Image: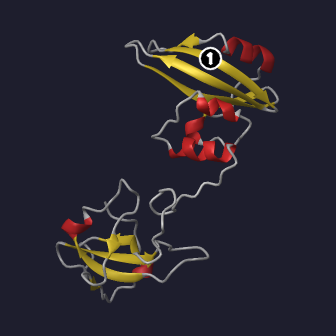
Amino acid sequence: MGWSGNHDREKYVADYLKGFTTSDGEKVTFRKHHKSGAEDWFILDWEKQDGTKGSIITMMLWDGGMVKHMDETAHPYYYGCPVAWFDEVPLPEWSDGAYDWRMVVRGTPVNRCENCRKLDCSGHDDQLIVVCAWGDWHKDVPKGMVGVAACYGGRKQGQYASEQKYYLVPQSEYDQRDLKGHIGFIVDPARHSEWVTTENRATKEVPLIA
């Protein structure tokens, strides 16, 4: 959410703490409030019309009379929230942002793999991860195959980038890649043949095909 208003902070927060009901009938109340510099933190409790209940940590960020609303799932990059609140409010487990944010508030480094987003991952430096792909519309990709470019660790750019290598993989196999785990497709040089083409692939590079 962007910045809004020109508000009196104290009055705005006091009115907010009274709670409200959303347009779809969800009741919102506030269990706790903590002020930290330009940040106002809240434990927000909600209850839907069907009786489903939940809680989340939210904040207001102030700049003069302008205010911006955020919650922990967006990893707001502000860290004045009381750590003790984490024992009261369950972590939204579906949100990497909330997990990472809480780790930073606790003063614990976040160690997530850039490829699979898992914590304490042993890494993918020895795996050829696809960074770009061409379908069989490419004149040098046989029907039913996918031409791919892959880098060790999936590092296409930056300080630790590795050279791109090119392979052909069956379309049916490529379609089974792990999109949910964010790794994508891992090339096996022992099974997948090298892709040789007369085209200048660097100038015809496209995003990963769906």
User: Dividing the picture into quarters, in which one does residue 1 lie?
Assistant: top right
- Asked if 183 appears above or below 124 in the picture, the reply is above
Query: Where 16 sits versus 34, above or below?
Result: above
Q: Is residue 70 visible?
A: no
Quarter in which the C terminus is drawn: bottom left
Quadrant in the picture for residue 138 = bottom left
Q: Residue at x 51, y 18 (%)?
A: 46
Between 3 and 200, the one lying in front of the other is 3
Residue 92 in the image: x percent, y percent? 50, 36
Under circle 1, the secondary element is strand
Instruction: Classify residue 81 by image quadrant.
Output: top right
Q: Which residue is mark 1?
A: 30
Camera-side residue of 104 and 163: 104
Looking at the image, which residue is at 24% across and 81% down? 191
Crowdedness near tag 1: few (<14), some (14–19) or many (≥20) residues, C-alpha within 10 Å = some
For the residue pair 104 and 184, the one nearer the viewer reads as: 104
Q: Residue 165 placed where, x, y %?
A: 40, 83
Residue at the image position 66 percent from the left and 24 percent from the top = 42
Amino acid at dot 1:
Phe
163 lies above or below 7: below
Left or right, 138 with reference to 12: left
